């Protein structure tokens, strides 16, 4: 019986960032290819989401031509909210324990939560706080332990299949998020709504 619904954040509550603007600027600045610039951004993002560098260091490393605050603003604005998600999840409050389980960087995540007013969540397990991320199995174990959940009581919603596999291996029910409409249908199939 499902007692807890666990949501990824990026890609479920908002769309992915648009890095296409950053890659060519970074590539030109340091004299590398577009693909190499993409790898550099990925490496910096990984360090930041694991709490190994600060958000200011992340913004400074990638966008010093823009200035830290300008780049931070650009970063925040590059994500667009997925219409209908907060309202759909709010309907679950009081019926299920609700959690965010996300690979995120601190100031961006805090900004997103504040803007969306997602105070109906019972807790958060975030990569930057824990120093690990999805799809590391120990990150999933941590969520179970932190909130005293059994694997067969958890439904996990994520937009990335590779993040769903470890959850499924642990015995969690999973939904591959593709749209609000599709998620609502999946909830209805499980008699959650």
Image: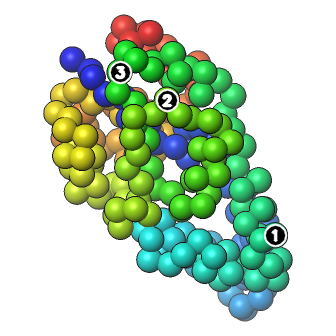
Residue 28 locus on image (x, y percent): 78, 85
Residue 98 locus on image (x, y percent): 40, 30
Residue 190 locus on image (x, y percent): 35, 12
Look at discs 2 and 1 and give the one toward the viewer: 2
Q: CA–CA distance between discs 2 and 1?
A: 31 Å
* Element on which disc 2 rests: loop
The residue beneath circle 3 is: 96
Question: In the rendered image, is residue 107 in sight?
Answer: yes
Query: At x 16% / y 33%, what residue is drawn?
Result: 150
The residue beneath circle 2 is: 120
The numbered mark at residue 13 is none
Please identify the quarter of the rendering in which residue 29 is found.
bottom right
Residue 99 locus on image (x, y percent): 40, 37
Location of the N terminus (image quadrant): top left
Of labels 2 and 3, earlier in sequence is 3
Please identify the quarter of the rendering in which residue 135 is found.
bottom left
How packed mark 2 is, by other alpha carbons closer than 10 Å (few <14, some 14-19, many 20 or more), is some
Query: At x 24% / y 47%, what residue is drawn?
Result: 146
In this image, 79 relative to 21: left or right? left
The numbered mark at residue 70 is 1
* Element on which disc 3 rests: loop
The answer to the question of whether label 2 and label 1 lie on touching residues, with beta carbons closer than 8 A, is no
């Amino acid at each position: 019986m499902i007692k807890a619904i666990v949501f990824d954040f990026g890609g479920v509550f908002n769309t992915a960032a648009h890095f296409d603007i950053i890659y060519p600027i970074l590539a030109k600045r340091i004299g590398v290819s577009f693909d190499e610039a993409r790898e550099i951004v990925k490496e910096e993002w990984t360090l930041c989401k694991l709490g190994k560098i600060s958000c200011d260091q992340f913004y400074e490393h990638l966008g010093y031509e823009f200035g830290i605050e300008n780049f931070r603003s650009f970063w925040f604005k590059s994500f667009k909210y997925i219409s209908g998600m907060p309202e759909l999840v709010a309907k679950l409050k009081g019926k299920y324990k609700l959690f965010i389980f996300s690979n995120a960087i601190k100031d961006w995540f805090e900004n997103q939560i504040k803007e969306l007013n997602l105070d109906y969540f019972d807790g958060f397990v975030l990569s930057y706080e824990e120093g690990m991320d999805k799809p590391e199995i120990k990150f999933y174990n941590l969520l179970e332990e932190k909130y005293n959940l059994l694997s067969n009581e958890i439904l996990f919603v994520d937009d990335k299949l590779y993040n769903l596999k470890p959850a499924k291996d642990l015995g969690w029910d999973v939904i591959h998020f593709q749209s609000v409409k599709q998620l609502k249908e999946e909830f209805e199939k499980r008699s959650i709504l």
